[in-house]
Amino acid sequence: MKVPFVDLWAQYQSIKSEIDNAIEGVIKSSAFIGGQYVQQFESGFAVYCGAKYCVGVGNGTDAIYIVLRALGISPGDEVVTVANSFIATSEAITMTGARVVFVDCDPETYNIDAAKIEGAITKRTKAILPVHLYGHPAEMGMINEIAHKHGLYVIEDAAQAHGAKVGRVKSGRLGHAACFSFYPGKNLGAYGDGGAIVTNDEELATKCRMIANHGRIKKYDHDFEGVNSRLDGIQAAILSVKLKYIEDWTEKRRNKAEIYKQKLKDTEIILPVELSGFRHVYHLFVIRTKNRDAVRVYMDEKGIETGIHYPIALPNLGAYRYLDYNPQDFPVATLCSQEILSLPIYPELTETQIEYICEHLTAAIRSEK
């Protein structure tokens, strides 16, 4: 049996006529940049998040950079973020000229360890950038308390957390602003790059929109130099179709995660957790196991695709050698990078496929003892 890590073709087949009609509508009206389809999606996604404003941009990395810039983050400033994430999180900080400051991750959720944030704050710190990694929100209550105490901004990196919740509040309303990615493999994915900024702050939303559109609101009337980062009409139309299904797809992901947990509960595998009062949307189903690399080879031989998110903790990358960190500074993130393994999870994954995955995963682990 072949089990892909993600099956976007199966998803497309389930909504093919709606997607095709949406794309045709954009082409017929030539609404490729801006226009009704972008406005429709921005409005719909803001409502979905429970926020007032949504600004579509070119990708999730740009979303973070644009928010940081709109908040005045600049050279000489520092922004605190987690040691376990994709480089886009820290890269966007550096793009503003600010210095990235890493904090180790929590061993249960793999999100930023909120208890260690205050130790990383200096007089130059201007913001905290928590990542809702794998679809589980960070400890936003504690993070917001720390931010309030020190007068800092909180920007959510929600690239993997569309629809995730703390209590009844969705990602997008848990900080000053939230940044989303619509990369094709995301829970809400486009058919190309795309991103969005969500906030309740009208002034911030306006500034972000101007930065993303060459520093202007009106054509040829530029108040400052910005960048070119716009969600295009075709991607917006596709996302509006998919937005109607996101809650159903999320519940299916959560159901698949529970099936995995039941089938693997009596093994030595460290399984994902969902903290009380949080809603995990399982963008990824990440386990931990010793001899991870050998287990992954075994799974590949059985036709099961897996992933590693992420094989090198951010502070240990060559890109951040200049910060003079060492792996011992981030023991949890470093250990996790050696043990984490992402299993296939998506709404179309069948229970038969999950049984096949679990059967060979347990066999792989036994063979490595």
Image (spheres, grey):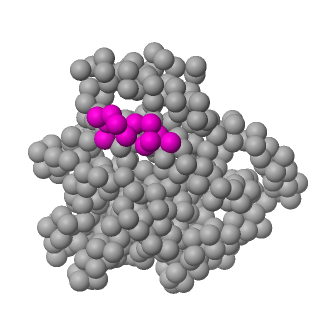
Residue 244 image offset from top left, x and y in percent:
71, 60
Q: Which residue is outermost to the right?
A: 28
Question: Is residue 255 toward the left or the right of residue 21 in the image?
Answer: left
Q: How many marks?
A: 0
Residue 224 image offset from top left, x and y in percent:
50, 74
Q: Residue at x 15, y 43 (%)?
A: 327
**Residue 215, above or below 59:** below
Question: Is residue 287 toward the left or the right of residue 279 in the image?
Answer: left
Question: Is residue 330 toward the left or the right of residue 20 in the image?
Answer: left
> Can residue 285 be seen here?
yes
Q: Residue at x 18, y 71 (%)?
A: 118
* The image quarter in which residue 80 lies: bottom left
Q: Residue at x 16, y 76 (%)?
A: 123
Q: Residue 161 or 214: which is nearer the viewer?
A: 161
Which portion, as a residue range, is magenta? 259-270
Q: Residue at x 50, y 55 (%)?
A: 281
Which quadrant of the figure contains the C terminus? top left
**Residue 126, above or below 57:** below
**Residue 132, above or below 213:** above
